Image (cartoon, coloured by chain):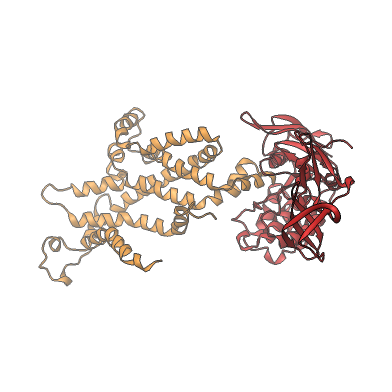
Chain colours: A red, B orange
Amino acid sequence: MLHLNGLGKRFGDQWILRDLNLQVREGECVALLGPSGCGKSTALRLIAGLERQDEGSIELDGARLDTIPAERRRIAMVFQSYALFPHLSVRENLNLGLKIRGVAPTQRQQRINSVLDTVRLKEMADRRPQQLSGGQRQRVALARALLRDPRVYLLDEPMSNLDAQLRDELRPELRQLILQGSQPVVYVTHDQQEAMALANRIAVLKGGRIEQIGTPEELYKTPASCFVASFIGRPQINLLNVDQQLTIGIRPEDLHFDVDGMPCRLISREWQGASQLLLLDSPRGALRMLCSGDAALGESLSVSWPTRAEHRFDASSGRRLAG
Amino acid sequence: MNRRFVPWISLLLLWSLLPMLWQLISSLSTAEALVDGSIPFLKRWTLVHYQELWASDPPFWRYLLNSAVVSGLTTLITLVLAIPAAYGLARLPQQLRQLLRWITAGAALFPYVLLFLALLELARRFSLGNNLIALAMPYAGLAMPLALLLLTSAFEGLPRELEDAARLEGLSLWQRLRWVLVPLLAPATASTAILVFLFAWNEYPIALTWLSRDDLLTLPVAMARIAGSSIYSIPYGAYAAATVLGSIPLLLLVLICQRQIVSGLTNGAIKG
């Protein structure tokens, strides 16, 4: 179990991470989700030992982790830029760490061959990283992480440099190779869809602090603030100001056509096949609405939503209101 | 390459290569042919200048060897000290690094000739005269600022995550330098090494004052002696031959390292 206790990091007077409390159990994957500059990568670098925290502590299985130097922490990290050594072939990239850590040559060969089989890169073993595609490079990085035999996996936006199709291909591989292991996994991303798809729990970060932490379902169904509500779920939630005190959020998928509802004007639509996204102009502001792809649309529409689908937030603080 | 540049490039090549060609031709011409244009083309040529250089006492290769020893040692000392120092500099906080960079640049631009009296004093005090290994010390010191500047920016150009990855793989600081950073810096190191070697190879005032024994002279001092060996005539031929011989080792060095130098010079221009 990985324990982050009140972790904080500042540069100068500026706190970029504050009061981070988080527990990641064995075999659990927790995603740190947030916009750029929210401190999520810093949290990862603190766990890895690449930077030193200014307050708080990190524990692994009940023992202090943050007193061990990064070289000996036995933590594997997968970088967005892959961080493969450009002057070494794939095989040498995988070999370097094993050699330094004193693994016997025959055993090294055996382990490298087996991990190359796992990531389906046997034919590429003698190529340089520059000669590989982005997806292949990231699989080499995964192989290197696997060979580290780590106590914790850290993934820093591992798929952000890949195009959408490659991401779809790599996601099951990532899940099978790393997320199904017994180690705690911390996954940093700014892509809510990726976090929802891969993580057991998600911590949404804003300005260096955890805004909310919970399962993807909890975050989607009971967002703790306007920020979380608009960060989780695509298309983005509609936020309507009712009065000075109250803002309500309605997800585009909760809107439905209703002749007795609010009259709206259709501004634009994106047809996505099974569904379509409508942008509506209503008396209460612009609305995003998701409806079935074969719905026939008239000139003027009337929409409404069930009251139970409303998320109610305090207008000034953005916090969720009870009930 | 754009065709429009061809004439300009030819002109530049001519500009820089013509003097060298002139020297080569002079070194192979008889003394009479150098001052008398009426001698027929086929009768102009001779190898006598080279033979003279070889037969002199001490023979000319001795100077080449002296210069090679001093320059090689200077390059070695400079790199061994500058690589770790540059790594350290590149890892300092931005403001401090900037300050040190300015100081280093100031030291690199300082006209070192102004130091030679002080250096001579040091040589006297510590009996460092007539010692090739001792001569490499001021050379290494004088070459250090430039080497430091070049290598620091090379270190800064390396993606930080490469070192992070190596660290998490379990590599200690020295192992990271040995297995990851230094191999990646090979191009920058090669071009720095050439520049340092060139400086030591060409250096004149310090060598002139630190060395007096005939068999320990370095190339520039020896060549100046040839030029001034007679008060009645200037031995153009022998001088040209010495110039040609003196530039051959440098040409070889540049040819050997040319791939690294070119990629080192364009380093930073193109993100790899």
Residue B182 against residue B241 in the figure, above or below: above
Whether A268 is drawn above or below B232: the answer is: below
Tell me what residue is drawn at x 35 percent, y 50 percent. Answer: B65
* Coordinates of residue A251 in the picture (x, y in percent): 81, 50
Please tell me in which quadrant of the rendered image residue A229 appears: top right
Task: State left or right for residue A257 relative to residue A283.
Answer: right
Expressed as whole percent of the image width and height from the top left, the position of residue A277 reads: 76, 58
Q: Quadrant of the N terminus of chain B?
A: bottom left
> For this rendering, which residue is in front, B167 or B226?
B167
**Horizontal relation, residue A66 to residue A219: left or right:** left
Front-most of B92 and A9?
A: A9
Above or below, comparing residue A120 to residue A147 in the picture: below
Q: Position of residue A242 (x, y in %)?
A: 79, 40
In the image, what residue occupies the spot 19% across and 67% down? B45
Q: Quadrant of the C terminus of chain B?
A: bottom right
**Residue pictured at 53% horizontal, 54% vertical:** B271
On screen, residue B29 versus residue A260, left or right, reads left
Q: Is residue A235 visible?
A: no
Residue B244: horizontal and vertical position, in percent? 28, 57
**Image mark count:** 0
Identify which residue, A189 or B216, lies in the foreground. Answer: A189
**B131 or B120, nearer to the observer:** B120
Left/right of residue A220 with respect to residue B191 in the rendered view: right
Is residue A142 shown to the viewer in this render?
yes
